[in-house]
Amino acid sequence: MTDKRLGVGFIGSGFNARFHMLGWKGVRDADVLGVWSPNAKNAASAARYANDLDVGAAKAYKTIGDMVADPAIDAIWITGPNQARVENVEEIVDAIERGRGTLKGIACEKPLARNVAEAKEVLRLVNRTGIMHGYLEDQIFAPQIDTGRSLIWARGAATTGRPYLARSSEEHSGPHTPWFWKGEMQGGGVLNDMMCHSVLVVRHLLTKPGESLATVKPKRISAHIASLKWSRPEYAKQLSKTMGVNYTKTPSEDFASMTVEFETNDGFTVLGEASTSWSFVGAGLRLSAELLGPEYSMSWNSLDAGLKLFFSRAVKGKVGEDLVEKQNAETGLMPVVANEPMAYGYEAEDRHFVRCFLGKEKPLLTLDDGVEVMQMLMTAYKSAEEGKTLDFPPRGLDKFKPAVARGEWKPPKQGR
């Protein structure tokens, strides 16, 4: 254990990195001290953002190696694009193995990579250094998930038996930046982008607090993907104009559903249902979860935030996201998520991994968990492509790349 504050450097300067920085106001014992991005202007902007938030005297670095080499940097948060994941980790490991610097920890944002092979390569490279690692999955740290799960297991499951069904969903109107929409760069569509959240949440809810995720093992997976909105001609044209992608030729799925049959260490079969969408039209981002057992249930909807505002047609203002992430309107009756980094789990997540890298806690999630999540996602893609339920893990998963990522997927035509 050490009393030293943790100096943290960020790889990535975009939306995700800034959400972590915003949540850093609730993190103790650590400072955001560095940012690297392939775009120097963006790196400098993100560093200024951290400084303005007063979460650390951050500065921009010219290279990842330079950031690792700085004695002030003790840990790295990897928050850049999926397609750069392996390359970014290679640069970290190269700097360490050449003796340029040392690190206490490496934390990587979801998903770990674009496919199983890349995810295993990230794990292999980091394990080679012997450095502690963590898998950044904010939603299992959301206070409603954490508190609800604890109470359900302590009161309901303890007296009437373990829960048998968990549901989780993440829905919004689409990503902020172009690379998310490009199957080859991102690794798929909404399934690879967001199902990593939902499938881990259902498994987490079905796992008794204090026990390993390995006590709830995935055995069979079935999934379905579709392009419900964004490949329609009028929306494909809009997407081409705003994001520079052509969904009439190389679409990605904007909806995915997945059912996982788990086997528990005490011999029960339990189910997880997860769904994700880029075709949801509502106030903004909606996260939801349920956990059901013999004599109890819990439910959570992030848009039931308690605070609501109403603006009449006379109120004119610019488009923004000051009420809720992925906000879709500025008038009418609107829910407000007052502290999104706390509500979505970023604050608790970052606090946890800071404490882990300072030697005060053991990681709740490691890159090994990130690899298993990727295996579940790729099994889901494979199930959707083959139109059948698959045993987990199916053969050939390490070499599998979804048709969406290969630019070969063609969704069924949707009517108006």
Image: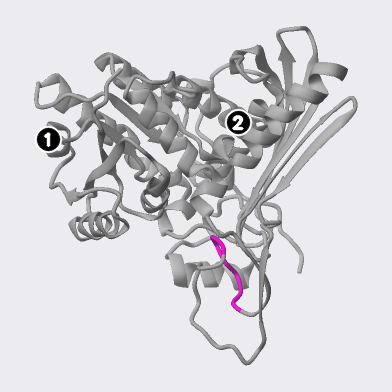
Q: Residue at x 55, y 46 (%)?
A: 344
* Residue 368 higher or lower than 309, as above or below: above
Q: Residue at x 44, y 30 (%)?
A: 352
Q: Nearer the viewer, residue 399 or 31?
A: 31
Q: Main secondary structure of the magenta part?
A: loop
Residue found at the far bottom of this picture: 314
Q: Nearer the viewer, residue 198 or 205?
A: 205
Residue 251 is left or right of residue 167, and the answer is: left
Residue 89 is left or right of residue 217, and the answer is: left
Question: Which quarter of the rendering shows the N terminus?
Answer: top left
* Residue 316 higher or lower than 303, as above or below: below
Residue 22 in picture, x, y percent from top left: 40, 53
Q: Residue at x 24, y 49 (%)?
A: 37
Tell me which label, 2 or 1, sits earlier in the chain. Answer: 1
Q: Nearer the viewer, residue 356 or 77?
A: 356
Q: Residue at x 46, y 61 (%)?
A: 245
Residue found at the far top of this picture: 266
Residue type at the position of mark 2 = Leu
Q: Where on the picture, by quarter, is residue 202? A: top right
Label 2 or label 1, whichever lies nearer to me, is: 1
Residue 381 in picture, x, y percent from top left: 61, 35
Question: Which quarter of the rendering shows the C terminus?
Answer: bottom right
* In the image, residue 107 lies in the stretch drawn in magenta: no
SS for dot 1: loop
The span picked out in magenta is 324-330
Residue 358 in picture, x, y percent from top left: 31, 24
* Residue 172 higher or lower than 329, as above or below: above
Q: Mark 1 — residue? A: 70
Residue 148 is left or right of residue 230, and the answer is: right
Q: Mark 2 — residue? A: 200
Residue found at the far right of this picture: 295
